[in-house]
Image (cartoon, coloured by chain):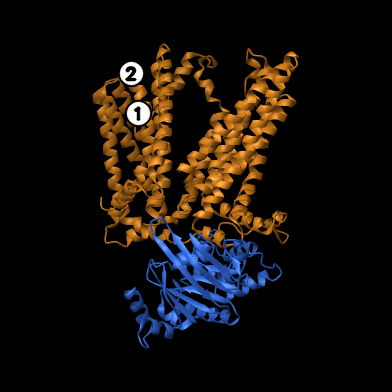
Amino acid sequence: MTLLRPRLISSRNGLRPGTQNNHWTRLFLFILIGLVFWIGAFLVFYRILTYFQSVQDFGDILAMKLLSMMIITFFALLLFSSIINNLSHLYLSRDLPLLHSMPVGIRDIFLSRWLGAAFDSSWMVIAFSLPVFLSYGLVYKAGIVFYLIAFIAVICMCLIAAAISSLVVLLGAAMLPAGKIRTLFVILGVLLAVLLVIVLRMIRPEQLVNPDSFASVVLYLNSMQALSLPYLPTTWITDTVQFALKRDWTHSIFNLALSASCVFSLIFINGMAASAIYFRGFSRAQTTAKRLFAPLKFRGHSWESLLNFLSRPAKAFAVKEIRSFFRDSTQWPQLFLICALIIVYLYNFSVLPLDRSPIKTIYLQNVFSFLNVGLAAFVLSAIAARFVFPAVSMEGEAFWIIQAAPVSIKTFLWIKFFLYYMPLLILSETLIVASNLLLGVTPFMMFLSILTIFCLVPAVVALAVGLGARYPDFKSENPAMSVTSFGGVLFMLLSFGLIALVIILEAGPVYRIFMSRMLGYSFSLMQILWFALSFAFALILCIFTVFYPMKLGEIYLMKR
Amino acid sequence: MIKLKDLTKDYGTTLAVNHLSLDVAAGEIYGFIGPNGAGKTTTIRMMGGIIEPTAGSITIAGIDIKKDPVAAKKIIGFVPDRPFLYEKLTGLEFLKFIADLYQVEELHLLRKSEDLLKQFALWEWADEIIEAYSHGMKQRLIISAALLHDPKVLVIDEPMVGLDPEAVRMVKDILKRLAAQNVTVFVSTHTLSLAEDLCDRIGVIHKGTLLAQGTVAELNLAAKTGEARLEEVFLTLVREA
């Protein structure tokens, strides 16, 4: 407990009034957003379960299958996040050298760090599994004991995942430096997730809920009642909850006891393994990783010469940014994720069953095209939140170099803006053009989509750079996580707000213009004025969003 | 060459620097000493254009840093107290980055980088990623980067922290040679023997105020300590403040 005290005290001190990173506003914002998601998840699950209840004969099977799928998903998520957290907490945190210099047993150090890692990787799963169990409890009219058992079962599941992960990490770190294992796990994990998402999309799981697409009900039921392995912890957890729902307390508690004994055994094994190999791995983690790739050169020219059209400071920043990005292996998985996102995005448009809809195809195609602008802009926002918002914070403690250099903060921020603006513009326009081609929209919609995205990209990028500069975190161990900070959340909210406003401003005129083309009527002067004002206001909004946040960021960085 | 006039920095809860005024001539090595929290680093960071003064002015070679920070920074070489760098770049790439920011002539850049890295015993590590460097190596790399654009003024905060004895001797020799070439050196340090050995004049700062400045003899006069060593003078001045 003594070893956990610095962490607890730091969290408490963060809530003190007057501290620079006052956590109260952040906490309030998080609770608010969390609550929205929480209520949303509850409503969705409650709706699904009530629908299942209405399906005769196999409604129960569907509900239980969903529960088992949820638990397996939670467990897989927990395993993955526990591995990353255990690596950081046990081998890579900055305070570890101090901790290891103290007269404390290696087992105690391990256990305190393990508990921290288990908490960090589990709290979100625990929080978001509660609406799932609440909806099950309400639909099945379970008593208070069900909630208690479900809660303990979830805690057991988290601890089992954390203990299995730490064992894997302990063994891995004894063989390879921890930095390399993290890279390996992150890349493998993300590749696996990407593959899973693509495969899931390609097999079109939405068809599974449509029993008509099955040859017979028997086949459908068989596929639902897949075998569950009795020796897997997820089976025990699922059984605990399922039996508790059916008020079969004996079987429920038996499975809960199995899970709990598994937790204690794993902790015991972890303790023994830690005594034997934790310190060896920690020592190994202190070595610095070698460069993975040799510098890329073609006939004596390096790739940098491709950027010769930029001014010297701009090129210097671009080269530095690109090098730092590609040499930081933790960034690579993000690229795989973006690729997967784009593939799935475009694939979804290619399989839209427009021809089967009772509404006129051409109308539907263009409605989708308009919605697509908003959707592509939201994707852009998410990418900007992950890559552009932390761009200023990524300078880290080396920001003094920029401050001391003969380059103004304004120039620095605009260079950052253009560095991200160009690739994001190309990405967004490709996305919108490709999806519009797949939809087969009218030239007017194509032109409007391209133009809207052309105006939205600089606005979203500038908002991300500007707010990233207004709320920088130069001391973070992982600046990419700054998207979960107050500034990051504010960026997401403002960015979504901006996109929604632009779409709303365009929606009315676009609908009128489109209908006039379909039905062949002309516009009154007032209508033309309304169109002009709407488009002009959307444009002004975008221009304002390009310049104002950048100015805010510049003023803040100069004053700090 | 360096002129600070009524320089003040108020953090709201702390008055870090209080109406500080001083002049440093071209080619002079000026030592800045004071206890922890005296305002040395804040002063140096204001001189490097890293933080904005609350009041007062800083003039470097006749350029007001507030009015034209970019022009002033072009002639300053700045070395902070902690060697934070872009860890994913190699030593040579970092120097190239700095050269591009300071618009150093490209023609001789490679040669100059090589000379500096050899001078600071880093040439063998030139193509290694900075995260593999030790604290002392990073410190040496920062000093070589600060010299890359031939600054007229060198502002250094705690130059010897983390350096081995050989590197300390090397840095001392380099600073003396630069001063002989008319480069102005403003150095803050806790190592009083270094200040005594290296600096033409020394300023003693305490609680944001300049207590005294001058040669060691002049400081002795101010502290009425006879011919005592700098350590004794410093302790007397701070105690009586």
The residue nearer to you, when weighing A483 against B40, is B40
Identify which residue is drawn at 72% across, 56% down. A308
Which residue is identified by label 1? A238
Spot occupied by residue A455 in the image (x, y as percentages of width and height) = 66, 36
Between label 2 and label 1, give the one nearer the viewer. 2
Spot occupied by residue A363 in the image (x, y as percentages of width and height) = 67, 18
Mark 2, secondary structure of its residue: loop
Which residue is identified by label 2? A140
Q: Is residue A433 visible?
A: no
The residue nearer to you, when weighing B135 against A402, is A402
Q: Amino acid at mark 1?
A: Thr
Q: CA distance from mark 2 to mark 1?
A: 15 Å
Earlier residue among tags 2 and 1 = 2
Q: Is residue A110 visible?
A: yes
Task: From the image, state the color of chain B.
Answer: blue
Spot occupied by residue A116 in the image (x, y as percentages of width and height) = 34, 47
Identify which residue is drawn at 29% across, 45% down. A267
